[in-house]
Image (cartoon, rainbow, N blue to C red):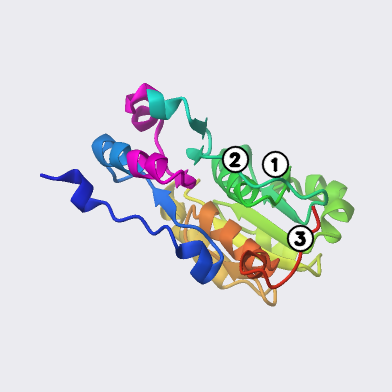
Amino acid sequence: MNLHQDVRLDFDRRSRMGLEEAILAGAKSVEHLTVILDQAAARNARFLFTRLAPEQFDALPEMHRARLDYDRMSRTAYFGAPEPLRVDTRVVVLAAGTSDTPVLREVSRTLAWYGEPALEITDVGVAGIWRLLERVEEIRHMPVVVAVAGMDAALPTVVGGLVSGVVIGVPTSVGYGVAAHGQTALNAMLASCAAGLLVTNIDNGFGAACAALRVLGVTARAHGSSSTNR
């Protein structure tokens, strides 16, 4: 089997849609990941890897591990340098519980790859709603709020009734029994009475970050249609 024939990287995606190809590592073999990294290195390209398990990372050739900025909690890796961070912060990422932190980190790491800093606020679920209310003034001025929650996933609905910015809900697979690996959280967010709430797939922190980037016009700037404020 010629592994190089299995891999066809999209080096021009940024020029078409403003966002680069991201490498979903989870279902890929270490051999395929190595080929991808070989091709990226040969082109001096940069890639964001998502769902890269620690055992996959540990099994990569040392020369590639040395070049990857790997975060074990979010299972994301940077091959190449992220874009310089903006001076101002325009996105806040909320996690209902500390168990939701890996998805929260996937959101913030994806945003940082494109130069967007994120304010991370954890453990503000509605079971102790006073924790959210303590930070609500901090949250209100943000153009984009990403709310990550499992279990009954009430957090995005509550936030959607408190702020005027775009709210993106990310259901997580945190929970047990009828939580059904995130299906209940997904349905709760889709059935929300908060007007204009956007919802991603279960555990899809990467997708939430990309939606935030589109809202903020980062994809448009990639086409040179507006200037940055860094």
- The residue that label 2 is drawn on is 101
In three-dimensional space, the C-alpha distance between marks 1 and 3, rounded to whole angstroms, equals: 29 Å
- In the rendered structure, the answer to whether residue 221 lies left or right of residue 51 reads right
The tally of labels here is 3
Q: Which mark sits nearer the N-terminus, 1 or 2? A: 2
Q: Residue furthest top?
A: 62
Q: Which mark sits nearer the N-terminus, 3 or 2? A: 2
Residue 126 coordinates in the image, percent (x, y): 71, 52
In three-dimensional space, the C-alpha distance between marks 3 and 2, rounded to whole angstroms, equals: 30 Å
Q: Which mark sits nearer the N-terminus, 1 or 3? A: 1
Looking at the image, do the residues carrying marks 1 and 2 touch, with CB atoms under 8 Å apart? yes
Residue 116 coordinates in the image, percent (x, y): 70, 52
SS state under label 2: helix
Q: Residue furthest right?
A: 137
- The residue that label 1 is drawn on is 122
Q: Nearer the viewer, residue 31 or 159?
A: 31
Looking at the image, do the residues carrying marks 3 and 2 touch, with CB atoms under 8 Å apart? no
Residue 215 coordinates in the image, percent (x, y): 67, 69
87 in magenta: no
Q: Nearer the viewer, residue 204 or 33?
A: 33
- What's the magenta region? 37-62
56 in magenta: yes
